Each structure stands twice: as C-alpha cells, then as structure tokens.
Amino acid sequence: MAALDYLQKLAQRSRFGIKPGLETITALLDALDNPHNDIAAIHIAGTNGKGSVAAMCEAVLRCAGYNVGRYTSPHLVCLNERFMLNGVPVSDDSLEAVARAVENVADGVEQRLGCEITYFEALTAAAFLLFREKGIRLVVLETGLGGRWDATNVVVPLVSVITRIALDHCSWLGGTLAAVASEKAGIIKTGRPVVCAAMPDEARAVIESVAAGKQAPFVAVAETVEAGVSETGLEGQTVRISTQARQLPPVRLPLAGAFQVENVCTAVAVMESVAACGLEIPEEAYVKGLEGVSWPGRFQLAGSNPPLVVDGAHNPDGARALRQALKSCGIKSAVALVAGFCGDKDALSHLRELAPVVKSAWAVAIPNARSLTAGETAGIMRMAGIGAVTECGCLKQALDEARDWAVACGGTVVVCGSLFLAGEALRVLGA
C-alpha cells in the first residue's frame, strides 16, 4: 500500500527523540482541518505504566457504553495496534486512507516550514484524523516520549494523567527525577484536572507545583484510592478497590504483578475524574472493564510448561517492578533470562536489579536500529554479576535453549529488556 510505504519511509528517516516545539504537528493538523479539536481526550504521560493505565481506562469506558478510541506507542507486532477503535485495531484499509490523507498535505507543510515531519508526528496526525473519520469523540491518548514537546500535546484534555516517573531517556528528558517530571508535567492544561500516580516525592513536588500554577485540580492517587490483593499468580490477581465514592466488589484483574495494582488504582482515579466531568460510569463498568482488560507484553504469561513470562521492562525501575512481580507470584530464583536492549538504555542497572534471581541468561539483539549487539548485551550481563551467559544470534534459539534449561531445572523463563523484544518474542511464540 503506497500510503503505508510513506509511513515506513518516515520511520526510516526520522530520528528518535524529542523535536522541541509543536509547530510542525500544529501546521500538519491545520492542513487536515484540525481533527484533534473534535475529541475529548484522556491524555497520559509517564515513564512506566502509562500503557497499562490507557488500556484499563479504555476498557472501562467501553463497558460503560461509550465509543472509545485509543492511541498508544510503540506497537508490539503490528502498526495497527497503536490505533484502537472500540477495542479493535484499525483495519489496513482505514489506516491506509488516513495515511494517504496525511501524505497528501505533508510536502506542502514541510516546504512551508522548512523542516521534516517525523514518523511520530505523521502517526499522531493520522490517529486524530482516523478518530474523526470514524465518529469517535472520546479518546485515550498516550504520549510517545516526554510530554511538553510530544506531538500529542496539542489537545486540551478532559483529564491529564501522569504515571510513575523514573529515570529514562535521560539524554532527552534530563538526568534527575525533577527534570523528567517537569517534561511530563508539560501536558497539564489550565483548569483541567491532573491525576498523579504514586510517585517519588521529588517528582510529585514538580507535578503538584505545575498543577497549582495552572489552577489544575490535583488528584493524588495514593491519597484517594486504596487497593488490596487477596489472590495473585502469573495469570492475574484478585484486587479489592475502594475510593471515597465507591467500594468495588473483588475484581479479577487478568494482569499480574504488583505494579499493575498501582496502575489499576490510577485508572480508577482517572475514571472518577472523568465521571466528574459529566460522563456516567456505572459500577459494573469498572468491574467488567477491568476484568476484561488486555495489555500484551507486560508481565504476560506466554507459556506454561515451563512458565514463560514476557515483559517490556526496559529501565531499572521497570526491572525492579518485574523482580517484585516475580517474587509476589512465588518465583524467587531459577530464572532463565532472555534479554536484549536498545543502546540508549541503562542496561547495566537494569540487569543488576534482576541478577539476584537469574541463574542462566541468553543475550540477543532486538529488532531495532538502536539495538545493542548480542555480544554487547552478554558483556553487560557478566558485568552485572550473571554467571552463566550465552550469546545468541537468533531469538528462537535463545527461547528454545532457555526453555530446555528451565524444564531441566524447574525454573521460569523471563524475556525482557525492550518492548521491541517483547513483541518479537510474542510473535515467535505465537502468543
């Protein structure tokens, strides 16, 4: 498809990172008659958890009877996953149509401004156009990188949401929690509520200050939502959730890991903020939506004999959450690790978080131009204190050897290090 070829060309040429300013995306959307002005958005930024929160919010809203769109990034296996229409990925034909519309105006915008449109800017414009074409007005919208200069930050949202902040993309966002939080807080808009997830104090102080300066009502999830877990395992967990407004019946959340409890609390706080804007959300929609939510590649049980977990953790905070999730599910040691990283990640700190439970590891490259080689990752694994390390040129070989080892040793296979790797692993596994 020619229009999708255009997007692929953009993917090859555009640099990774933040392009300061919103002039290009604004001009591109203006050439498309500003489709972003037709939506009511739940706009989500953060380091970890924003995709899970987006999936939970979308699921609850659909169960409340609303037509809902969702735009997230990156995709795991197929580009269509980024554009969800009432819980279903966009069709090839519909995606081609909006990509063609973007392509038709792109040259004029680039010539007028004297700059290149990036891949993410084109995708974001296509998403807004798609939602308008399909008559979807309520959208859960995830930032790509940062917040302040993110292409999605052209909306005036119903609610802004900031999930847990950690050090990641430091060359773009800054080397302190306060600096990263400042970039993420750039999505806060005057007078619009902001929901702040559980957060390091340094990051929360920045977000709360920005909210106060913009007279944006500040909702601290840690102070408004409580949750307790009664049953947990690799296939999910039973959570009891209460707020000042409601006490939900036990919810069987199909997403495992303690970090997902934090995310579900954030999603519930967001839904209550949305309800305060005038959208009715009955209690049964909370329960049905959360029990039916799907968010692949995040502590996902992708095999059972031996247990095989695929997780997109790609920074030290995510690795810490992964290790805690394994512990909460009764997996304390005998982990066979298959890992690969992008070169801009703190792979050493990530692997040091996991090293105490890893008994054997397989290093692979990931399907991305920024990937470390398998040899580079193997060297970092050894530096992190992992003893038995195998360098693999093929992910399937690594998975096969790791599973054989886990069967022999009564262990569990864990795949992590990158969402790109998570997606490729799910494809190889047929999961």
Image (tube, helix red, strand yellow):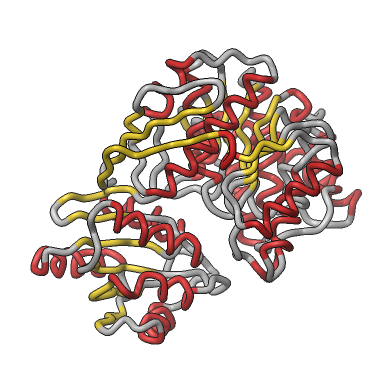
Q: Is residue 205 above or below residue 238?
A: below
Tell me the residue at 26%/51% (across/down): 329
Q: In the image as oriented, which residue stretches furthest toward the left?
A: 408
Total tally of numbered discs in the picture? 0
Q: Is residue 65 left or right of residue 308?
A: right
Tell me the residue at 21%/61% (across/down): 412
Q: Within the image, what quadrant is residue 340 found in?
A: bottom left
Q: In the image as oriented, which residue stretches furthest toward the right?
A: 112
Q: Position of residue 311 (x, y in %)?
A: 38, 55
Q: Is residue 162 left or right of residue 243?
A: right
Tell me the residue at 70%/19% (across/down): 277
Q: Position of residue 199 (x, y in %)?
A: 60, 52
Q: Position of residue 390 (x, y in %)?
A: 27, 80
Tell me the residue at 37%/80% (across/down): 381
359 or 199: nearer the eye? 199
Q: Is residue 392 left or right of residue 347?
A: left
Quarter placement of the N terminus: top right
Q: Is residue 69 left or right of residue 278?
A: left
Q: Position of residue 151 (x, y in %)?
A: 73, 46
Residue 236 appears in the picture as rendered: yes
Q: Is residue 306 above or below residue 103?
A: below
Residue 27 appears in the picture as rendered: no
Q: Is residue 43 above or below residue 367?
A: above
